[in-house]
Image (cartoon, rainbow, N blue to C red):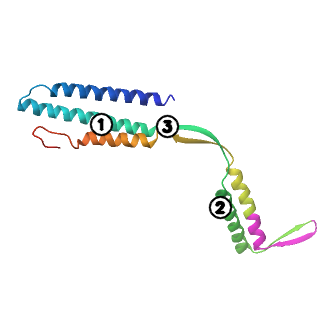
Amino acid sequence: MRALIPAIVIGLVLLIAWLADVLYLRSAGHQAMTGEQAARHARLKRMHQRIVGVGVVLYGVYLSTLTGTAMRWVLPGIGVIGGGAAAGAGIGLLTYAVVGAVGVVTGGVGIALGAAAMALIGGGVAAVGAATGGFGYRAVAYPLVTPWLWIPTIVLGIYLILGIGIKRPGGSSS
């Protein structure tokens, strides 16, 4: 919640600036003006709109950068375990292709390990390693402000900067 306080304050400052801009320009717009005064008023109105537009774009970009962090207990996925097992089996088969059959003697009995046994051992060890590597707590970052809010804010700011559809003195649009 503390991270949102500056965003709320900046948003309120922008809202007050926009309201002051609207009230000032509307009060100045109701007065009788000469051609030169009307042109000056139009330039001032356009400049104010661009300043507010830049502020709104910067505010939208600021909102997009707000992230929170949470600690979550994570478990390994099936894909991670399967990928580890496949890699281990491949290493076991590669070992068999390079070294050949390996003889193991335990307790007076000799056993020759072939390709299938090496792939099974390599796949089993790799699957256990992949499974244990995914357990534990992990910091997960998430956006505090949804893109449904900050994307339209940036678009509105760009609209204000470009001034599409603003009436100019003489009836033309920019």
Q: Where is mark 1, residue-wise?
A: 54
The residue closer to the viewer here, 147 or 117, is 147
In the picture provided, is 129 more to the left or to the right than 156? right
Q: Amino acid at mark 2?
A: Gly
Q: Amino acid at mark 1?
A: Val
Pointer 3 local density, CA inside 10 Å: few below 14, some 14–19, many at least 20: some
Q: Quadrant of residue 137?
A: top right
Count the numbered circles shown.
Answer: 3
- Foreground: disc 2 or disc 3: 3
Q: Any mark on residue 144, and which?
A: 3
- Circle 3: element type: loop
The residue closer to the viewer here, 43 or 97, is 43
Q: Kindly report the distance in space between the C-alpha atoms of the residues bearing marks 3 and 1.
A: 22 Å
Q: Kindly report the distance in space between the C-alpha atoms of the residues bearing marks 2 and 3.
A: 33 Å
The residue closer to the viewer here, 119 or 81, is 81
Q: Kindly report the distance in space between the C-alpha atoms of the residues bearing marks 2 and 1.
A: 48 Å
* Lower sequence index among marks 2 and 3: 2
- Which residues are drawn in magenta? 107-122
Whole-percent x, y for residue 48 in the image: 23, 32
Whole-percent x, y for residue 171 in the image: 12, 41
Pointer 1 local density, CA inside 10 Å: few below 14, some 14–19, many at least 20: some
Q: Any mark on residue 41, and which?
A: none
Q: Any mark on residue 83, and which?
A: 2
Q: Quadrant of residue 37?
A: top left
Q: Amino acid at mark 3?
A: Leu
Q: Residue at x 21, y 34 (%)?
A: 47
Pointer 2 local density, CA inside 10 Å: few below 14, some 14–19, many at least 20: some
The correct choice, above or below, for 62 with respect to 109 in the image is above
- Circle 2: element type: helix
32 inside magenta stretch: no
Q: Is disc 3 in contact with disc 1, using a CB cutoff of under 8 Å?
A: no
